[in-house]
Image: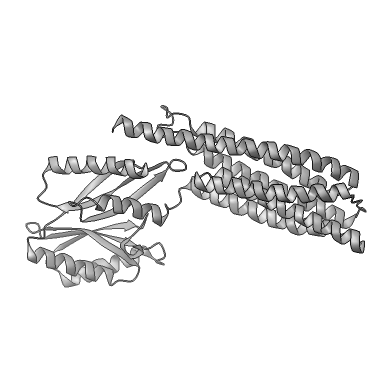
Amino acid sequence: MSSDIISTHSLEEQKREKTIVRTSIIGIIANVFLASFKAIVGLLSNSIAITLDSVNNMSDVASSLITIIGTKLAKKQPDRKHPWGHGRAEYLSSMIIAVIILYAGITSFVESVKKIINPDTPDYSAAAIIIVTVAIIVKILLGTFVKKTGKRVNSDSLVNSGTDALMDSIISASTLAAAIIFIIWHISLEAWLGAVISIIIIKTGIEMLTATISHLLGQRVSVETARKVKECILSFPQVRGVYDLIFHDYGPDKFNCSGHIEVPDTLSAREIDQLQRQIALELYVRHGIILTALSVYTYNDLDENEKELRCNIYNMAMSVQHVLEAHGFYLDKEQKRIQFDIIISFDAPDRDAVYNEVINKIKTAYPEYEIYCTLDADFSVSEQEE
């Protein structure tokens, strides 16, 4: 692979890392100032909501530090123990941030319930109202900026931190609303509002944690990514079909991919070798995806009988419910053998039963042939999702 191409991708990764670190540092500075002011005001006004809000700001500082550490770890070069690099460290940092948010929500809920049972009379001052108002504005601006940056550079850690900051602005807004209600009507609602907001934070933390764990478990690649890869490979005129795309996620924007291509049976081994090399290069240049393996199906459109048989086999397979795709047809006339693959949806109640139905249907139609069918799964994108 060209050193210029590798250098370009390396520069892009360095730029991404700098953006994440810079954004996290901005978040740390903003949250340290907000936490300091809120702690002082909370203690002076005897407001549990404002005091808890200051603690939550310090958890945001920890989140930003974890984001920086995770980004630095993910940038480490591959080694013998981790040959595909350390990119998944970013997912671990995202998971830790989600746990921090979940813990903050649970802690806030417990403290709010305590205040509901044993209420204190808050003492809101003009300074407290002003500081809470400023905090709301700062948190909205900070959260929007961090979350937007996180989406731009595909950083779950930044997205989680930005979401946390926006949740903080809601907490602060509820505190401000409670203060205004108390000043006007002398009704203390901050503990109740704190409990409601805490439940929202807990829900958000669980959703973030679930999403990050899904990445670590190996979730299905997005249809958009699979389509881009498929379109890239199909841009080569020798390739008639792309099937069985399998992706391995080694961190944000770090994918390895393998698959099958369907090409004419007239291509020589040398031509197929050159084609595979060109596809691997093009895929890396366009999308930064490493092609680890590319197997080959061949077809022969010069034989009209074979072409008709392939079409009939595919139509029979696709007529069975839950079959998403049929491909990889091969006819061995001497051995009287038909080979092909089918993709059966994960939504099928019994995938084996669907598979057997396809086999029996084709055996009934073509009893003179041996039927060899490979059962595939819709790992990325099938023809019905195009």
Query: Which residue: 19% across, 67% down?
Result: 313
Query: Which residue: 86% across, 47% down?
Result: 127
Image coordinates of residue 167 in percent, x first then y, are 68, 52
Residue placed furthest toward the top: 80
Up-down relation of residue 87 to residue 104 (above or below): above
Q: How many tags in the picture?
A: 0
Relative to 84, is 211 on the left or the right? right
**Can residue 102 be spotted in the picture?**
no
Image coordinates of residue 284 in percent, x first then y, are 33, 41
**Which of 95/180 is in front?**
180
Relative to 20, is 38 on the left or the right? right
Relative to 125, is 290 on the left or the right? left
Assign the C terminus to one quadrant of the image.
bottom left
Q: Quadrant of residue 300?
A: bottom left
Assign the N terminus to one quadrant of the image.
top left
Image coordinates of residue 369 in percent, x first then y, are 13, 64
**Which of 39/201 is in front?**
39
**Can residue 96 be spotted in the picture?**
yes
Image coordinates of residue 295 in percent, x first then y, are 23, 47
**Which of 144/292 is in front?**
144
Query: Which residue: 50% across, 34% down?
Result: 74
